[in-house]
Image (spheres, grey):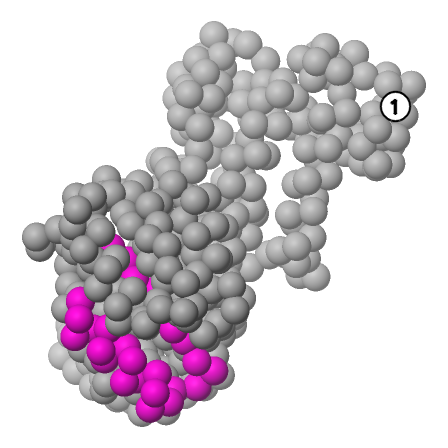
Amino acid sequence: MFENLSSRLTQVVRQIRGTARISEENIGDTLREVRQALLEADVALLVVKEFVEHVKQRALGQEINASLTPGQAVIKIVHDELVKLMGNSRATLNLVQRPPVVILMAGLQGAGKTTTVAKLGRWLQANGKKSIMTVSCDIYRPAAIEQLRVLSAENNLQFYPSDAGQNPVEIARQALVQAEKKLIEVLIVDSAGRLHVDEQMMEEIKQIHAALNPANTLFVADSMLGQDAVKSAAAFNNALPLTGVILTKTDGDARGGAALSIRHATGKPILFLGTGERATEFTEFHPERIASRILGMGDMLSLIEEIQQKTDKDKAEKLATKLKKGKRFDMEDLRDQLQQMKSMGGIAGLMDKLPGMGGKLPAGVTEQMQNQQLNRLEAIINSMTPQERKFPDLINGSRKKRIANGSGNQIVDVNRLLKQHKQMQKMMKTLGKKGGMQNLMRGMSGKLPPGFRPQ
């Protein structure tokens, strides 16, 4: 998400970073670039006009004149205005009510609403330690009820059964009664979607809302629709008292116009982002972190949280202990690292959050190519015997041929992996020593992106 916008704005940031004096002329040039970048990202014209005007007023004001580093001060202003545009601070669900707390999901067909119900339930179960029940009131879309039943089972969520012959409002009422009986803490209600906003759809969801009086009414928007998503969000906001928005399919949205416009159009905060198809690919929306990512400053807080959530802590501790004892980093260890990297979205998922990288892969290299490369490396390691994985130096010419054939690769691929492993062995040996991280960073000085400096 935001790849195109981030690429353009990162260039603007580089151009202005070292500027010693800000004038109306050079700030005008900078804002023209910013305006063009936002428009290309499919941000609403009114939003772009207001954003650029706010930045201009602050940039030509007293806070820049008083600054010792005017270029850096302008960057901070752009960052602050992006944060303000997206809602200033992290907004949260209202869960402080007598249970069951009801969350009503609204949105158009195809936005990923049913999948999002399961993702949200799983997230609340894992992070809020809540008991969750889901129910589908979508009696129109074929297999919608069955889809939610399967997703609920896969994510260990309780599911209230319904069928296409029932009235949607009655389904909602009965589910609420059942949730109360079972002492469920959160009931998530999936409503019907349509291909476009229509009167029948709005009347039905209004009736469901009146029957449930939900604590949270969330609009699920397909971020890839850009301004169409913003318009439909505004239409639902006029019909219902929305409390927040969830953006889906953000992994396929290179522009990000919906994220930058939807708060302005509805006045309602973005609460979560759907970042992929898997149930785990669902994250909280932090305006300040997203703004930093857009400007190529990275998002280290999200990266740290992701590492804490998705890495195997036991394996990490065992590896650290192993290295401290002076033991070698073997192929089993490398395979563990590859698997954990894949769980965090692969190389592209990491680069998106690293300062100075702007989420950009090397020229000509796609995210799919990177993921295929990780799978290829893992296949080569899996084709080795346990002894070869533990002692890679045993691998001679005939063993290389067997490993290449067994993994569907060439001998040159096996050689490349063995060379990479030796380089990582040296790096891990440095990490295992006292002051290892500082030594490693100094040794890599000059090879790191901006913002990474040894201490």
Q: Position of residue 183 (x, y in %)?
A: 17, 44
Q: Position of residue 240 (x, y in %)?
A: 22, 80
> Could you tell me which quadrant the C terminus lies in?
top left
The verdict on residue 196 being magenta is yes
Residue at 56 percent across and 47 percent down: it is: 347
Q: Decide which of 322, 229 is in the foreground and name it.
A: 229
Magenta part of the chain? 186-212
Residue at 18 percent across and 55 percent down: it is: 177
The answer to whether residue 9 of the structure is visible from this angle is: no
Q: Decide which of 97, 234 is in the foreground and name it.
A: 97
Q: Decide which of 274, 99 is in the foreground and name it.
A: 99
What residue would you read off at disc 1?
Answer: 402
Q: Amino acid at mark 1?
A: Arg
Above/below status of 436 relative to 121: above
Q: For the residue carrying disc 1, how many other residues have a C-alpha within 10 Å: few (<14), some (14-19), or many (20+)?
A: few
Residue at 51 percent across and 56 percent down: it is: 277
Q: Number of numbered discs present?
A: 1
